[in-house]
Structure formats: structure tokens, C-alpha cells
Amino acid sequence: MNNRKDILVTGSNGFVGSFFKKNMNPLTSVFTSRSTADGTISLDLSKYEKLKIFFSEVNPKVLIHIAGNKDVNFCEKFPKDARQINVTATQYLVELCKQHGTKFVYLSTDYVFDGKKGNYSEIDIPLPSSEYGKMKLESEKMIQSSGIEHIIIRSGALYGQNGKFYQWAVNSLKEGIEIEALIDSFFTPTLLDDLYEITVKLLILNFNGIIHIVGKDKVSRYQMISKIADSLAILNPKLKPMTISESGMFFLPDLSLCPDKLNKELKIYTHTLEEGLKFLVSSF
Ligand SMILES: NC(=O)c1ccc[n+]([C@@H]2O[C@H](COP(=O)([O-])OP(=O)(O)OC[C@H]3O[C@@H](n4cnc5c(N)ncnc54)[C@H](OP(=O)(O)O)[C@@H]3O)[C@@H](O)[C@H]2O)c1
């Protein structure tokens, strides 16, 4: 008990988790991922016996569970495989948090909603229309019904320096490659720095419950890429508007989340998309 670590973070080699790792104190936190990397312990969360031993050794006060498979198409095609990390691992971690009195911080998603009306608040009833969303909702429910202290954070379309979408858009725009972008699929992009800083604040405030952390603006992919072009001072970017039906792919019309609870109850605010993009360009 004396060696109890403050925080255990999963998914530390991924896009979101590596940002948390970069910013958190390695003396009081432990970082895990399935793969190995400097400062990260390799741990497959779908293997209970090893996980149980490891968790007992670390005995964290707080678990920040970021690991997951967010590939919507993979989850659709191979739900059994994706369940291992998106549901089974959560089930194991809930059990271990119960045993060790650990607070569970879970990173969930806008995909728990059906994506028809948008501007979803915490009191809207989730109704996922994808396997990915169904799995993330199942995990949310397990955590909520477990009786353990928890924070369920729903976020969407995270962007940051190392984000694949952001980097792809920046490179394509700089190289003058034509980009086909959806005009009828909306979301609330969220600066990764905001997600990280607000997660820390919520822990300091000892917040419990469910909260939406998203950027201030709802945009289409087309609008997002136009704004990235603006932030890079690229005039007349080669953007071709496209609709969901023209794309022939799985996209939902409106997955935007409403951050009113965060803003009005907790007086915590995220950045606008313009501010976030400006910040990223200035930190290159
Ligand atoms: N990115 C977003 O816009 C966004 C928005 C809302 C919510 N989220 C949620 O945030 C989480 C992480 O997203 P991300 O963008 O960081 O994804 P990512 O870059 O694909 O990272 C996924 C992480 O999960 C780990 N992982 C996968 N299977 C594992 C297993 N069996 N055991 C242990 N670790 C495993 C990966 O480990 P290795 O890399 O070491 O294999 C990696 O660290 C997901 O749960 C997603 O639902 C993401």
C-alpha cells in the first residue's frame, strides 16, 4: 500500500495516451501499452491473469483507461476481435478497480449516439449505430453500474500534432494534393491539449460522473480542412466537396456533442477550432 502509484494510464503508445504520457509525472504514474516503448510497460489488457498481477503491484489510486480500438470499420467487420480491448478489457479493469478502490477514468466517444440530431448532451439517450459505439457504450454502462468512483469522458475527433488526420490534411494541403471532403457529416473537433488539461482538472475537482469534453465548434470535414488551410495561410486549397452518399462509406450526419455541462456547471472551457489550429501551427 505504501508504494501505491497515483495514476495508471493505458494506451500510452497511442495518439491520445502518448500525449498523456508526455505530460504526466513519471515518478507518480505508470504507463502501459500493448507494444513496448521507452517508459512504457508492455501489457495486453485482454489477458486477465497477467493484468491482475500487474494491477496489484501498481495498486493505482486512479486508472486512466485510454487503450481501445477506435477503427470504426474494423469494429464493424471484426466485432469479436475488437471486443477484446473495447469491452472485455474494461470488464477486467472494472473488477480490479473495485478490488483496489481505484477511481476509473474512461475515455469514451461521440459514437455512442446515433449521429442523427447532433449537439448531444449528457442527458440524451445514447443509441449507437455502429459496433464501435455499441462497445464503448457497453463499457460505459459497466463502469456506471459497478459502484466505483468514475469519470466517463465523451470526446470526439481529437486533433493534435501527431494526429493522423491532422498530419494528413497538413501534408496534402502543403503539397497541393486535391482533397475530397464531406460537407454533410458534422462533428465537434477537440484539441488534445484541452482533453488532457481538463481531465487533470476533473481529477483535482474530484468530479464523478459523465461529461462531454469537445471543442467549441461544430464543423463538417470540409470546413475543418478549410480551417486547417487558413491556419497555414494556404490560399485556395484544392478541396472538392463530397456528400456521404457519394463517398459510399460509413459516416454519420451529426455526431456533435454539447459541452454545456462542462461550461455552465464547472466553468471549464475548451478552445475554438481556430484557436486550437493556431496553437498547433505556433508549436511546430
Ligand atoms: N482519437 C480520437 O479522436 C478519439 C475520440 C474519442 C475517444 N477516443 C478513444 O480514445 C482511445 C484511444 O484513441 P487513440 O486515438 O489514442 O487510438 P490509437 O492511437 O489507435 O491507440 C490505441 C491504444 O490502445 C492500445 N491497445 C489496443 N489493444 C490493446 C490491448 N489488447 N492491450 C493493451 N493495449 C491495447 C494500443 O496499444 P499499442 O499501440 O501499444 O498496440 C494503443 O496504445 C480509444 O479508446 C478511443 O475510443 C479517441
Image (cartoon, rainbow, N blue to C red):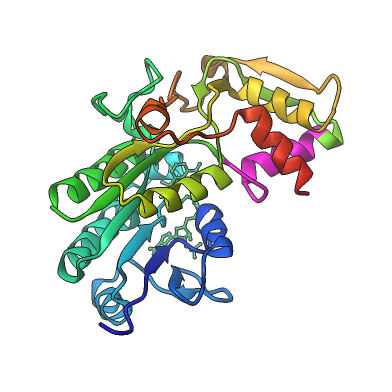
Prevailing SS of the magenta stretch = helix
Count up the numbered dots: 0
Quadrant in which residue 276 is drawn: top right
Residue 107 place in picture, x, y as percent: 38, 48
Residue 254 x %, y %: 44, 20
**Quarter that holds the N terminus:** bottom left
For the point 54% across and 76% down, the residue is 39
The residue lying at 37 percent from left, 17 percent from top is 116
From the viewer's side, name the closer residue of 253 and 230. Answer: 230
Residue located 57% across and 16% down the image: 246
Looking at this rendering, what residue extends furthest in the bottom direction? 2
- Nearest the viewer among 124 and 222 is 124
Across and down, in percent, residue 50 comes to 29, 78
Is 40 on the left or on the right of 176, as rendered? left
Q: Is residue 251 above or below residue 84?
A: above
Q: Nearer the viewer, residue 14 or 23?
A: 23
Give, as a single range, the part of the protein colored magenta: 159-173
Determine the residue positioned at 67% across, 32% down. Answer: 275
Left or right: 24 in relation to 1: right
Q: Position of residue 208 (x, y in %)?
A: 26, 46
Residue 154, relative to residue 96: is it above or below?
A: above
Q: Quadrant of residue 177?
A: top right
- Magenta stretch encompasses residue 149: no
Magenta span has 169? Answer: yes
